[in-house]
Image (cartoon, rainbow, N blue to C red):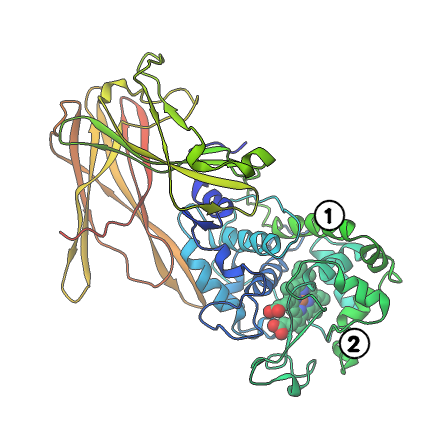
């Protein structure tokens, strides 16, 4: 199961916190469900629908027989294909770039975005797993198009692992959001749909385009469908009509009769769709909000030689009691153990509720601030055997003195990162910085993550006799507009490897 610390902590944060303090910002784009995407903020465009369609088009390259393709961000290299017409795919990828990092591939962000969009629109809770790997080229051209016949669609879905019933389900679940745009599909939607208030000429699939509900099915069964791919003027592109009726409307009738059945089936089908990945990819366990989780924890050496712990503790709950709780009245105590595993009345502190509130799509979430605790370094265990929240205090990033040179006009020069490494736990070998930045890739608007390694050198002692100071200077990568920049610092100390992971880009000027 998922425990802290994990390489996927960043994705878990993005999954769990959807507003207020600690919010990474992904859900804001699809809350409310009708929101249009930033950048191209046009009435009629809907980010939630665009993300769900992007996830489907990326995953639709999956082939169950070969185990190739699937959700792998190859969509970035496929935007010149007619199936992906419009700026929706690229606009989504640019937005997702802010959530891409060494431990969150673009493909994982695409999957996460669909899960959050569907939930924000009132749809099912879909389990999220991470670990997808980004492709570096286009996949096969297997995304279905509306003018194809039913047997082609059955064959397409079959090679993606979905039978006829599941095909009907997946198309219905997808087409409960959004619609068809006249600017991109003039053979399906008449140009008269384009107006000043509807510049892309969207015609929605059902009467509740911003609610993940079964109206797409109830309207179809009642004969009141407005779906341009079902009752459109051009019968050739009425693929939804052919698909909906492919089992004599059995599935559509079941969806129309029972909204809960619709939700459950959609959840299961989307989960399979998002987990369609190349057979070489090993997905993680399901990532669920942790009840208690450190957030932005920092452990630094102060000038008095004491270690200082700072940051926040996040508390998440789904019970009615948790939802009713007022953070300011919630006593949250942080206690720690000494080097012998013992507790002591003084090894404890009360945390203060952060005044700004936070929201989650999955329950209630509150943050509590650690009012910087100073402790003598020797009370920390290098590793507490996996119990509680192990604080790694052997290799520490030292923000004080770490900096990036300025070459003038805002052009960054080299970055110097400082680390403190314990000197009393055995020999220190191969200390290094792994710096992860983004490069543009020809053929896709999405950036690629690159990691370069620089060895660290011991430069001096420190204010504490237990730590020495190490330094590395390395070039910043090319400046792209997208992607997160992070670095890890690691060393082998006394035969064990210690890592200070995911430190944020250094902006302090030298
Ligand atoms: C035979 C299969 C399918 C065909 C031919 C098809 C075709 C289309 C077309 C032509 C559009 C209009 C796009 C636009 O104007 O922006 C559309 C929209 C959409 N499709 Fe499909 N689709 C199929 C299956 C699916 C599936 C399986 C899903 C999801 C699981 C899905 C999700 C969506 C969504 C959410 C939209 C709305 C996009 C927006 O409003 O921006 N589609 N589809």
Query: Where does label 1 land, which residue?
Result: 264
Count of all numbered marks drawn on residues in the image:
2
Q: Residues within 10 Å of mark 1 (few under 14, many from 20)?
A: some
Q: Residue at x 68, y 51 (%)?
A: 64
The answer to whether any part of residue 143 appears in the image is no
Q: Residues within 10 Å of mark 2 (few under 14, many from 20)?
A: many
Q: Residue at x 35, y 60 (%)?
A: 439
Q: Residue at x 21, y 23 (%)?
A: 427
Q: Residue 168: percent from the left, percent from the top?
A: 77, 60
Please tell me whether residue 204 is drawn above or below residue 170 in the rendered image.
below
CB contact under 8 Å: marks 2 and 1: no
Which of the 4 image quadrants contains residue 190?
bottom right
Which of the 4 image quadrants contains residue 374?
top left
Please tell me whether residue 406 is drawn above or below residue 239 in the rendered image.
above
Element under disc 2: loop
Query: Where does label 2 land, which residue?
Result: 231
Which of the 4 image quadrants contains residue 239?
bottom right
Quadrant of ligand 1: it is bottom right
In the image, taking residue 39 as reference, residue 199 lies left or right, namely: right
The mark found on residue 14 in the picture is: none
Distance between the alpha carbons at the discs numbered 2 and 1? 27 Å
- Of the numbered discs 2 and 1, the one sitting upstream in the chain is 2
């Amino acid at each position: 199961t998922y425990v802290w610390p994990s390489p996927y902590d960043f994705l878990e944060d993005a999954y769990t916190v959807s507003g207020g303090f600690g919010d990474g910002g992904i859900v804001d784009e699809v809350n409310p469900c009708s929101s249009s995407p930033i950048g191209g903020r046009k009435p009629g465009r809907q980010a939630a629908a665009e993300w769900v369609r992007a996830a489907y088009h990326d995953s639709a390259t999956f082939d169950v027989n070969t185990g190739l393709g699937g959700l792998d961000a190859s969509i970035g290299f496929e935007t010149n294909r007619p199936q992906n017409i419009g700026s929706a795919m690229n606009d989504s990828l640019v937005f997702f770039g802010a959530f891409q990092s060494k431990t969150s591939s673009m493909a994982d962000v695409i999957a996460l975005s669909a899960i959050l969009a569907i939930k924000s629109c009132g749809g099912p809770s879909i389990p999220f797993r991470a670990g997808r790997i980004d492709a570096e080229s286009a996949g096969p051209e297997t995304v279905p198009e509306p003018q194809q016949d039913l047997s082609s669609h059955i064959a397409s879905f079959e090679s993606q692992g979905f039978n006829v019933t599941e095909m009907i389900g997946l198309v219905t679940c997808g087409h409960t959001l959004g619609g068809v745009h006249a600017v991109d599909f003039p053979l399906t939607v008449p140009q008269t749909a384009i107006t000043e208030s509807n510049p892309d000429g969207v015609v929605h699939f059902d009467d509740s385009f911003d609610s993940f509900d079964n109206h797409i099915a109830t309207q179809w069964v009642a004969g009141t469908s407005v779906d341009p791919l079902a009752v459109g003027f051009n019968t050739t592109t009425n693929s939804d009509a052919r698909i909906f009726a492919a089992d004599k409307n059995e599935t559509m009738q079941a969806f129309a009769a029972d909204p809960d059945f619709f939700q459950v089936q959609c959840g299961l089908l989307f989960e399979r769709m998002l987990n369609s990945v190349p057979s070489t990819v090993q997905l993680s366990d399901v990532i669920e909000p942790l009840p208690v989780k450190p957030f932005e924890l920092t452990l630094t050496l102060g000038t008095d030689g004491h270690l200082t712990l700072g940051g926040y503790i996040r508390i998440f709950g789904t019970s009615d009691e948790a939802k009713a709780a007022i953070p300011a009245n919630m006593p949250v105590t942080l206690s720690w153990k000494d080097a012998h595993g013992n507790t002591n009345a003084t090894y404890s502190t009360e945390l203060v509720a952060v005044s700004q509130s936070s929201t989650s799509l999955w329950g209630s979430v509150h943050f509590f601030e650690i009012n910087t605790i100073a402790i003598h370094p020797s009370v920390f265990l290098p590793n507490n055997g996996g119990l509680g929240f192990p604080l790694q205090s052997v290799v520490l990033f030292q923000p004080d003195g770490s900096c990036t040179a300025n070459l003038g006009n805002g052009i960054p020069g080299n970055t110097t990162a400082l680390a403190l490494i314990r000197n009393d736990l055995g020999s220190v070998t191969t200390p290094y910085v792994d710096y992860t930045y983004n490069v543009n890739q020809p053929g896709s608007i999405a950036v690629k993550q690159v990691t370069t390694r620089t060895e660290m050198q011991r430069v001096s002692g420190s204010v504490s006799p237990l730590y020495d100071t190490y330094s590395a200077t390395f070039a910043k990568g090319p400046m792209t507009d997208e992607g997160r920049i992070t670095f890890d610092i690691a060393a082998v100390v006394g035969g064990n490897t210690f890592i200070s992971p995911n430190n944020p880009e250094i902006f302090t000027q030298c």
